[in-house]
Image (spheres, helix red, strand yellow):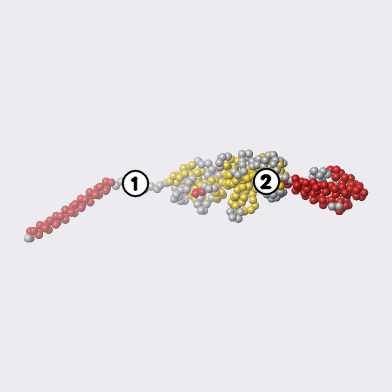
Amino acid sequence: MTNTKSLKNLRKWILFFLGITILFVSFKFSQSIANANTPDRKEGKSIVKEVYTREVTNGSYQVQIPSNGILQAYRRVSLTSRVQGLMQTINPLFKVGQKYKAGQTLVKIDASDYSANVKAQRASLYNLITSVLPDLQLDFVEAYLQWSQFLKDFDIEKPTPPLPKMKENVRLFVSGRGIISSYYALQNLEQNLQYYTLKAPFDGVLVSANMTEGSLVRPGQQLGEFIAVDQYELKVSLPKSYIQKIKEGAKVTLNSIDSNQAYTGTVARINAKVNTQTQSVEVFIRVSNPELKEGVFLEASINATTFDEVFAIDRGLLNGEQELFVVKNNILEYKKVQAIHYTETLAYVKGLENGELIIAQPLIGAYSGMEVIPTVLAIEN
């Protein structure tokens, strides 16, 4: 029994040493495998980024303010009737698109009844003057000769001639006979007679016609619109902050979207009133070109103030303190600048010196003192 117990103890020790041996061999084997796959370690090096830079070349910049609007005729007349009657047929007909010369008849309204009344008033004045001629011949010989000549020039079918020049005593005499009051009443009627015919005030085109021949025209009724086609205006609304940069006479480039045509205009007028709702000011641009038509949609680029010694950069290069990175001895440094004008993508700044290098594009993670490798881009300002 003692022998059996000894054998068991011996077996335990043999298994214990065998296990330790296996663990030691396994550890050495795994260590050799790990050492065989471990790459050679290299000494760490700092990474220097390559950045694109631009060389500063300051110059002049003409501020251009974009806007758009609808083209309108500079000279236009709204044709409105002041009298009543039937619209007569004349040549040419009163039609849209019809061209007229200055002084040519646009509209003629039947004035037969009114004309007869005017002639009756002329005859009444003629008879009134005739009745006082014998008294003038007796008391005012010189005045008699003047009024006799006036009657010779008087034609009932034509406008009444001007009254002769009179001395104060003669004026009192004829005024007491009602001649002067009758004369000016007749002048009023003759003035109204002119309203039955509308003439073109300038060379132009009829763009709107609300009446046709034979229609009954009433006082205050709008007959149509007449415009000149030699000059046009474009009304644009600009922010009030831009108005100080714009002067009358400034050149404006106008572009047509559909035809890709470019025209040159000038700033003709600037409204003195600010729109309270939009805080904008109306600017009127004058342009003349035979290809233009009223109602065309145009885009305008207005030449405003010119800035000298400025440089254009990407707006993203400026931080909130109006600073940007310049490259000196391959090191980034902040530099304070002054932003003069902004566009949608660019900022025009002052404070940079010719020949300085600035980064061309925003750089993620950039900081003052960062080492870089500059690569100069040749970009025109």
Count neighbours of disc 1 (C-alpha within 10 A) and say few if under 14, some if 14 to 19, many if 20 or more.
few
Can residue 308 be seen from the camera position used here?
Answer: no
Q: Which residue is mark 2?
A: 215
Q: Nearer the viewer, residue 224 or 111?
A: 111
* Point 76% across, 47% down: residue: 114
CA separation in Å, label 2 and label 1: 102 Å
Q: How far across and down, in percent of the image, does residue 70 sit?
A: 60, 46
Q: Is residue 70 left or right of residue 136?
A: left
User: Quadrant location of residue 229?
Assistant: top right
Secondary-structure class at tag 2: loop
Of mark 2 and mark 1, the one earlier in the sequence is: 1
Q: Quadrant of the C terminus?
A: top right
Q: Amino acid at mark 2?
A: Ser
Residue 42: numbered disc:
1
Q: Amino acid at mark 1?
A: Lys
Q: Residue furthest bottom?
A: 1
Q: Is residue 58 left or right of residue 367?
A: right
Can residue 316 be seen from the camera position used here?
Answer: yes
Q: Is residue 34 left or right of residue 105?
A: left
